[in-house]
Image (cartoon, rainbow, N blue to C red):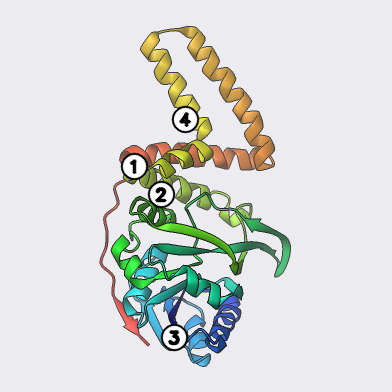
């Protein structure tokens, strides 16, 4: 099996060494005949590139202007020499991979293998919480394996997305008939500050809402999109539906029903999110999605790279 491993990162010096050493162990697998590791750096300010150089990484590429995860993965795929691709983020560690099983999955070029993901919430340099990340059906995060030809056929990732580019990619893959395989033969862990970190409290909901609106508008006819909207954004959808029905039928009972429904959903969300502060940020996310759905029209940008 000929394999290109694509690791992307920006200012991940704290995690990158563990990530790179975890993936280099794959080359000892008997199923792997040819092997390379590519590190795509999004113009880091730290010593990430030096770490990759010291580890003897086969290709190091720095993006020098416009960058995000979609740009980095596309560049990695373009520069990959081999036909099978493994994608990882620089703050992930490969815990387990059964190459024999992966090879069997990829005999069908319409297969994409998603990693089982363990999330580690980091505070002050230590893990304060770990949990298994559950993705919606047919979707994945940044750790997955697929054929290079399939990645290109799907069209790569849309670089307009600074967040949610993976969901957009996998929705398009599903619509083209690709199958998402979830298997314990491939598992990773991801170190993160988490959604609840103070530095992320407003930034993540803002970006999530903005790019969810773009995601939903772009893929509106997909049943995955509709399922995702109902799962993540039911409070604001209930609110907008109630308001529309009120103006359509001019019936106060519909307005009262909307208010009552929102009250129940609000209590549920506060309990689910773990407090009023987190609930407020979630509502902010919900309404940013609506605004973005109708008004956010980013353009694709050109990028340039430097091969180290």
Q: Secondary structure at mark 4?
A: helix
Query: Which label is found at residue 237?
Result: 4
Q: How far is mark 1 from mark 2, CA to CA?
A: 10 Å
Q: Are marks 1 and 4 in contact (CB under 8 Å)?
A: no
* 3 or 4: mark nearer the eye: 3
* Left or right position of 156 against 29: left
Q: Secondary structure at mark 2?
A: helix
* Vertical order, 253 against 24 (above or below): above
* 1 or 3: mark nearer the eye: 3
First of labels 1, 4 by sequence position? 1
The residue closer to the viewer here, 200 or 234, is 234
Q: How many marks?
A: 4
Observer able to see residue 10: no
**Is disc 2 surrounded by few (<14), some (14 to 19) or many (20+) residues within 10 Å?**
many
* Vertical order, 101 against 112 (above or below): below
The residue closer to the viewer here, 175 or 166, is 175
Q: How far is mark 2 from mark 4, CA to CA?
A: 17 Å
First of labels 2, 4 by sequence position? 2
Residue behind mark 3: 36
Q: Secondary structure at mark 3?
A: strand
């Amino acid at each position: 099996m000929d394999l290109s491993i694509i690791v992307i990162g920006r200012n991940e010096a704290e995690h990158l060494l563990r990530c790179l050493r975890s993936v280099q162990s794959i080359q000892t697998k008997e199923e792997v005949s040819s092997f390379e590791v590519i590190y795509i750096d999004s113009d880091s300010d730290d010593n990430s590139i030096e770490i990759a150089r010291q580890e003897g990484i086969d290709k190091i590429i720095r993006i020098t202007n416009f960058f995000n995860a979609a740009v980095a993965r596309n560049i990695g795929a373009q520069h990959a020499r081999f036909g099978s691709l493994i994608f990882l983020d620089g703050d992930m560690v490969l815990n387990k991979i059964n190459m024999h099983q992966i090879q069997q999955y990829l005999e069908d070029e319409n297969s994409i293998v998603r990693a089982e993901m363990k999330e580690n919430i980091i505070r002050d340099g230590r893990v304060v919480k770990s949990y298994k990340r559950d993705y919606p059906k047919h979707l994945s995060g940044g750790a997955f394996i697929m054929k290079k030809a399939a990645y290109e056929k799907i069209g790569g990732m849309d670089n307009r997305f600074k967040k949610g580019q993976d969901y957009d990619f996998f929705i398009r893959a599903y619509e083209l008939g690709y199958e998402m395989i979830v298997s314990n033969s491939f598992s990773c862990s991801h170190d993160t500050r988490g959604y609840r970190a103070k530095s992320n409290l407003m930034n993540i909901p803002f970006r999530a809402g903005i790019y969810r609106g773009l995601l939903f508008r772009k893929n509106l006819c997909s049943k995955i999109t509709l399922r995702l909207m109902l799962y993540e954004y039911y409070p604001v959808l209930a609110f907008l539906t109630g308001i529309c029905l009120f103006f359509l039928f001019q019936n106060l009972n519909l307005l009262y029903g909307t208010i009552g429904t929102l009250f129940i959903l609000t209590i549920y969300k506060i309990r689910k999110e773990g407090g009023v502060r987190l609930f407020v940020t979630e509502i902010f996310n919900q309404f940013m999605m609506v605004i973005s759905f109708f008004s956010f029209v980013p353009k694709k940008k050109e990028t340039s790279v430097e091969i180290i």
